[in-house]
Image (tube, rainbow, N blue to C red):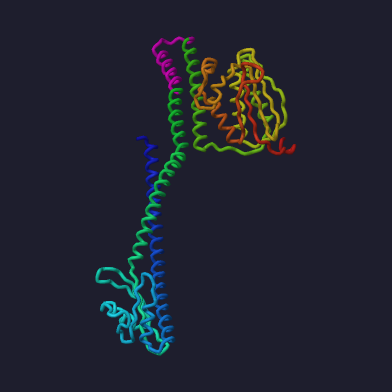
Amino acid sequence: MQPLARLRLQLTAWYAGVFTLVLALLGGGLFLTIRHQMSRHLDTSLRAAAAALERAARIREAERANARGAVVDAVDELHIPDRLLYLLDADGQPIKPTPIADWIRDAVRETARSGHGYRSLQAPDDRELRLYVERFTGTSGAPYVAAVVADRGELEDEYVHLIEAFAAAAVAALLLLTGGGYVLIRKSTAPVERSMEQTRRFMADAAHELRTPITILRTRAEVGLAQEREPARDRAMLEAIARETARLGGLAGDLLTLARADAGERPIAREPLYLDDAAAGAVDAVRALAQHKTVAVDVGTFEEARIIGDPALVRQLLLIVLDNAIKFTPAGGRVRLDVATVDGRAAVVVTDTGIGIPAAQLPHVFERFYRGDQARREAEGAGLGLAIARWIADAHGARIEIGSAPGGATGTRVTISFPVSPDLSPKERS
């Protein structure tokens, strides 16, 4: 199993475990709370039944002269579902019903000593009962004891139904949230997976690109050591080694730039600068390369445009774009640079009459080490320049777009647009 897949399963297991613990704690707390409330409700109902028996007995005493017969009639006429009613005299002798089980009578007598109260009982058949006892005086002045008994089994049945319903809901929620959690974890780790894949590919491509100049350097050095010294030949060999060393140094510098960018270790200055000034400096820097390739570099529209950014990085971005335009433009071709402010953004547009980029390759031009077939044939390079350019543009909130130049089958048009900043004063610009 791949490490990332194993990590997903581990995270999902942790997520499910934590959620199960939360459900268990929540369910336990909810069960205890409901059980307490249901027990209070049972006690309240027992007390209400005793009060109803007391009221019925007093009403019957008021209607009839025979107090003992009246209260017996009250018990016979009063029916409360799932409740057993008992009426005893002050000495604890049963009035209704008769006879009464000794264990109930003893419990009633013991509870009645305090006037009223609740008590839990264990029936001979192991049923759990709840007893409420209350003393009262009839209208004739005779003292009585009212007792109400309920079976706690009804509460246990409700507890079982409650636990079953909660368990079913908890299992369903756990399954749904585990599945949803795995999907979320998979989505959240997708960028990590892409980053790891890009890192692996980056390292493989970097090793491949570095291996070629290193192999050339080693081969030339070995050949030179095996030959006798000859000034002209040694000079040519050293010049070749110098070229490969320069290429290797440039590649190492590009790799270091991207590595620092990925790690966020490259500090980016935020200071006001004029894009037209930076573009003019970049054009001056590449004129020697353009003259060597006999490529004309023209400056078209050149409007003043103020931006906020890192001067060194902005210059590097413009140099990368101009260098690519010149490298991939055949001798006798032209490169044009325009700077203008459009819709609140400062744009640099570089167009050339070079080999162009096929439409199928445009989505990949910013990938590291990517070089199309024509680019490999026309010029040297590692394919890191546009990746660095994209990073610089993103770091400045700029947009960089590459497409075919309008009006021809060949050529490339690169547009870089920066957010415009308010103008500097003449003193600041100087």
Q: Front-most of 241 and 262?
A: 262
Determine which quarter of the picture holds residue 61: bottom left
Query: Visible in this render: residue 246?
Result: no
Picture layout, residue 65 above or below residue 405: below
Residue that lies at the very extreme toward the front in this rendered image: 64
Q: Position of residue 311 (x, y in %)?
A: 62, 33
Asked if residue 374 is among those painted magenta in the image, a careful observer would answer no
Q: Front-most of 213 and 393?
A: 393
Residue that lies at the very extreme toward the left in this rendered image: 124
Residue that lies at the very extreme toward the right in this rendered image: 426
Q: Position of residue 124 (x, y in %)?
A: 24, 71
Left/right placement of residue 50 relative to residue 123 reads right
Picture layout, residue 32 above or below residue 338: below
Asked if residue 229 is among those painted magenta in the image, a careful observer would answer yes
Q: Quadrant of the C terminus?
A: top right
- Residue extent of the magenta highlight: 210-232
Query: Visible in this render: residue 79?
Result: yes
Determine which quarter of the picture holds residue 142: bottom left
Q: Position of residue 189 (x, y in %)?
A: 45, 39
At x 57%, y 20%, the residue is 357
Secondary structure of the magenta portion, mostly? helix
